[in-house]
Image (spheres, helix red, strand yellow):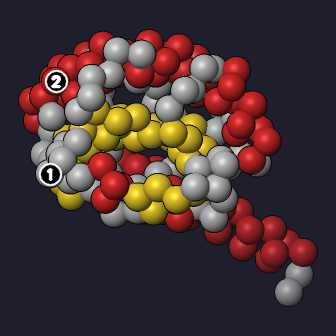
């Protein structure tokens, strides 16, 4: 193949990938929250769906499963140690976590990070709750994520009742948990 043909093929493949990603994102964001209304309007039209059942390992190697929290509300937040929006969101998560009642559990999942970076991020942002390490992207794939931060609220029946791609606020989380 000539150099010109390879260049055209590469540009075509890149364009197809970009268009596919945009179309996939547009067709799969109906369940995601609208940041303009901080979750109020989206909560009214959100259709709950079965949460992916998952098992993961904490930063310290302990095994945690969603099934461990059956009957409780679980807040799942994905982050990366290098992610600027994740760092900006972290104080909101910490404020929310400090007010959790006994029926609600907070889990964060470090993705696209190394273990030491995830541990440093968690320490720097006072993440005093369980942090899982998604070293093989299995948790990311289970939730069908394409980016971070992303937050899900799973009710005691195991249904996702709130989903947000992008930074979430303490207020939006509190409202979602109250509705769970």
Residue located at (34% from left, 55% from top): 68
Is the residue 160 above or below the residue 87 in the image? Answer: below
Is the residue 179 above or below the residue 156 in the image? Answer: above
Residue 83 picture quarter:
top right
Is there CB contact under 8 Å for labels 2 and 1?
Answer: no
Which mark is on residue 117?
none
Residue 2 picture quarter:
bottom right
From the image, which quarter does the N terminus lie in? bottom right
Q: Position of residue 123 (x, y in %)?
A: 68, 25
Residue picked out by circle 2: 178
- Give the camera-side residue of 62 and 96: 62
SS class of the residue under badge 2? helix
From the image, which quarter does the C terminus lie in? top left
Residue located at (63% from left, 64% from top): 136
Looking at marks 2 and 1 on the same chain, the residue that comes earlier in the sequence is marked by: 1
Residue located at (35% from left, 36% from top): 105
Q: Position of residue 3 (x, y in %)?
A: 90, 75
Residue located at (30% from left, 49% from top): 69
SS class of the residue under badge 1? loop
Q: Indicate left or right for 76 with 47 as reference.
A: right
- Between marks 2 and 1, how big is the CA–CA gap? 15 Å
- Give the camera-side residue of 169 and 53: 53
Q: Indicate left or right for 18 with 101 as reference.
A: right
Is any part of residue 165 visible from this angle? no
Residue picked out by circle 1: 157
Q: Residues within 10 Å of mark 2 (few under 14, many from 20)?
A: few
Q: Position of residue 12 (x, y in %)?
A: 65, 66
């Amino acid at each position: 193949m000539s150099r010109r043909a390879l260049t055209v093929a590469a540009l075509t493949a890149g364009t197809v990938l970009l268009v596919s990603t945009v179309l996939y994102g547009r067709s799969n964001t109906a369940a995601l929250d609208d940041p303009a209304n901080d979750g109020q309007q989206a909560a009214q039209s959100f259709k709950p769906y079965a949460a992916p059942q998952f098992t993961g390992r904490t930063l310290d190697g302990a095994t945690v499963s969603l099934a461990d929290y059956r009957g409780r509300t679980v807040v799942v937040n994905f982050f990366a140690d290098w992610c600027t929006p994740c760092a900006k969101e972290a104080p909101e998560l910490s404020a929310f976590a400090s007010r959790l009642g006994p029926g609600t559990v907070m889990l964060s999942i470090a993705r696209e990070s190394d273990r030491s970076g995830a541990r440093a991020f968690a320490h720097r942002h006072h993440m005093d709750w369980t942090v899982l390490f998604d070293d093989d992207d299995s948790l990311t794939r289970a939730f069908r994520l394409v980016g971070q931060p992303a937050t899900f609220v799973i009710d005691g029946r195991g249904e996702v009742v709130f989903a947000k791609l992008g930074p979430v606020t303490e207020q939006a989380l509190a409202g979602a948990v109250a509705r769970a």
